[in-house]
Image (cartoon, rainbow, N blue to C red):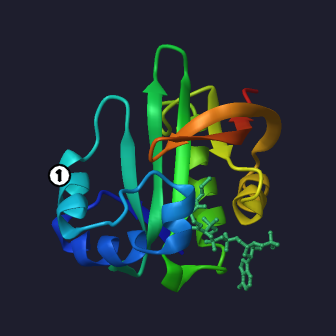
Amino acid sequence: MLALRPWTSDDVPALVRACSDPLTARYTSVPVPYTPQDARQFVEAGRSRTTLPLAVVDAEDPARMLGACGLHAVDRARGRAEIGYWTAPWARRRAVATRALRLLSGWALAPAPDGLGLARLELYVEPDNELSQRVAGAAGFVRGDLVRGGIVLRGRRHDVLRYSRSATRG
Ligand SMILES: CC(C)(COP(=O)(O)OP(=O)(O)OC[C@H]1O[C@@H](n2cnc3c(N)ncnc32)[C@H](O)[C@@H]1OP(=O)(O)O)[C@@H](O)C(=O)NCCC(=O)NCCS
């Protein structure tokens, strides 16, 4: 079973190894090259009113980091947030991203007090990132528009597909 927990300074070496991976560098906004200083800054920044960065871990071995899943651009007044994820190279193709995305989005869209009570989550995926699109679909996200130049990665604009998942309110 997977669990989500806050990042700690013990994660710095694993963060450096995971974020130095070319696929993570290509599709996310991590600094390139990714240094221990980058990892320490990321851990120290922690959560804020608009971001909730979480480590994905094995529930039975929470020290072993498997990936990242987090909320960004959280807007409680509008009931919206963006969600992002990567899986460490040593944990890929074992449904880590799919299960983590289900877990975090399920909690974010569940009514308070058990969940965060948001109404809608969005995530942005580049059209050639087929694995990530499969992950989004498997976690209940629905494909929407192509947003031209929708994200900026290291100074370059990229087209992205918008995926969204809404709360089901009975
Ligand atoms: C995209 C990414 C997050 C996928 O992570 P992952 O944990 O490997 O993804 P999952 O294992 O949940 O799912 C990917 C595929 O593996 C399959 N899979 C799951 N368990 C599996 C297993 N035991 N054996 C083989 N394949 C398996 C999944 O079913 C899925 O493929 P399918 O939909 O064709 O079946 C990862 O490749 C990554 O970190 N990429 C770089 C960063 C990135 O792109 N982030 C997203 C930005 S939008």
For label 1, the SS is helix
Q: Residues within 10 Å of mark 1 (few under 14, many from 20)?
A: few
| Rendered-image quarter of ligand 1 | bottom right
82 on left or right of 40: right
At a point 72% along the width and 53% down the height, the residue shown is 136
Taking the view exactly as shown, the residue that stands out farthest to the top is 77
Quarter of the picture containing the N terminus is: bottom right
At a point 39% along the width and 55% down the height, the residue shown is 54
**In the figure, 94 relative to 80: above or below?**
below
Task: Return the x and y of residue 3 as percentages of the image width and height.
Answer: 45, 66
- Along the viewing direction, whichever of 46 and 152 lies nearer the viewer: 152
Q: Which residue is mark 1?
A: 44
The image quarter in which residue 49 lies = top left
**In the figure, 116 relative to 133: above or below?**
above
Task: Return the x and y of residue 93 as percentages of the image width and height.
Answer: 66, 80
Q: Cβ(mark 1) to ligand 1 < 8 Å?
A: no
Task: Return the x and y of residue 146 as percentages of the image width and height.
Answer: 79, 35
Residue 166 shows in this picture: no
Question: What amino acid type should be assigned to the residue bearing mark 1?
Answer: Glu
At a point 72% along the width and 27% down the height, the residue shown is 169
117 on left or right of 58: right
Taking the view exactly as shown, the residue that stands out farthest to the front is 156
Quarter of the picture containing the C terminus is: top right
Residue 154 shows in this picture: yes
**In the figure, 64 relative to 73: above or below?**
below
The image quarter in which residue 52 lies = top left
At a point 17% along the width and 62% down the height, the residue shown is 37
